[in-house]
Image (cartoon, rainbow, N blue to C red):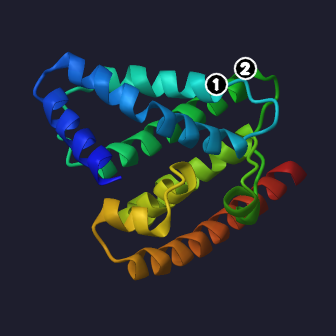
Amino acid sequence: MPEDTSEINRLLERWRSGEAEAFERLMSLVYEDLRKIAAWQLQSERPNHTLQPTALVHEVYLRLAANAQIDWKNKAHFFALVAQLMRHILVDHARGRLRDKRGGSVRAVALDEALNVRTASDPELVELDEALKSLDLIDERKSRIVELRYFGGLSIDETSQVLGVSSTTVRREWTMAKAWLRRELQKSHLRAQTDERE
């Protein structure tokens, strides 16, 4: 809705200028959208995940509150950052659970499982995050496309708007990024199998 977009953009500007009440108003305006994104994110996690959508949104809230001086461009930029924050929170949570488990090791995951079926266990999420970091070193935009589409639940058109490129470019690079990640995760799977045999 255009009026919501204009209001969100105004509140982001006011918040960046130091108006604390603008942040509170912004969060009340976008809260339901954030819960939908969090619920979408968590549906890809294991069924007994300890984080719930509300807890994930509250963690995002705390991290955003600590970063008021971000140079917000617009609503799309805000939601792109939210997607990135959720990715980091979920990966940090997965890493913590793996550290806590005795013998917790990272298991290789097929990209089809991670990107299409969207049911990722802690090790799979960590492995996907590592692959995304590698992709980021090679092609930052492709990495951002995966982050926005997979972790943020953004459509091709929304991703296009955030990145300032055409939908055709996003569609093409999304396909290329998935193929690259699939190869990386297969290599990782082969390394894990070799390590198990030794």
Residue 176 percent location from the top left of the image: 53, 77
Residue 73 horizontal side relative to residue 63, left or right: left
Total numbered labels: 2
Q: Which residue is mark 2?
A: 100
Tag shown at residue 96? 1
Q: Look at 82% across and 36% down and name the residue there.
A: 47
Q: Residue furthest left?
A: 17
Disc 2 + disc 1, Cβ < 8 Å: yes
Question: Of helix, strand and loop, which one carries label 2?
Answer: helix
Distance from label 2 to label 1 (Cα)?
6 Å
10 Å neighbourhood of mark 2: few (<14), some, or many (≥20)? few
Q: Looking at the image, which is closer to me, 171 or 130? A: 171
Q: Quadrant of residue 190?
A: bottom right
Residue 165 percent location from the top left of the image: 31, 73
Q: Is residue 27 visible?
A: yes
Question: Of helix, strand and loop, which one carries label 1?
Answer: helix
Residue 7 horizontal side relative to residue 55, left or right: left
Residue 44 horizontal side relative to residue 88, left or right: right
Residue 88 percent location from the top left of the image: 50, 37
Q: Look at 64% across and 25% down and name the residue there.
A: 96
Residue 14 percent location from the top left of the image: 14, 30
Q: Amino acid at mark 2?
A: Asp
Q: Is residue 91 above or below residue 107?
A: above
Q: Looking at the image, which is closer to me, 151 or 185? A: 151
Q: Is residue 24 above or below residue 44?
A: above
Q: Residue furthest right?
A: 197
Q: Amino acid at mark 1?
A: Gly
Q: Is residue 88 visible?
A: no
Q: Look at 61% across and 75% down and name the residue there.
A: 179
10 Å neighbourhood of mark 1: few (<14), some, or many (≥20)? few
Q: Quadrant of residue 116?
A: bottom right
Q: Looking at the image, which is closer to me, 132 or 83? A: 83
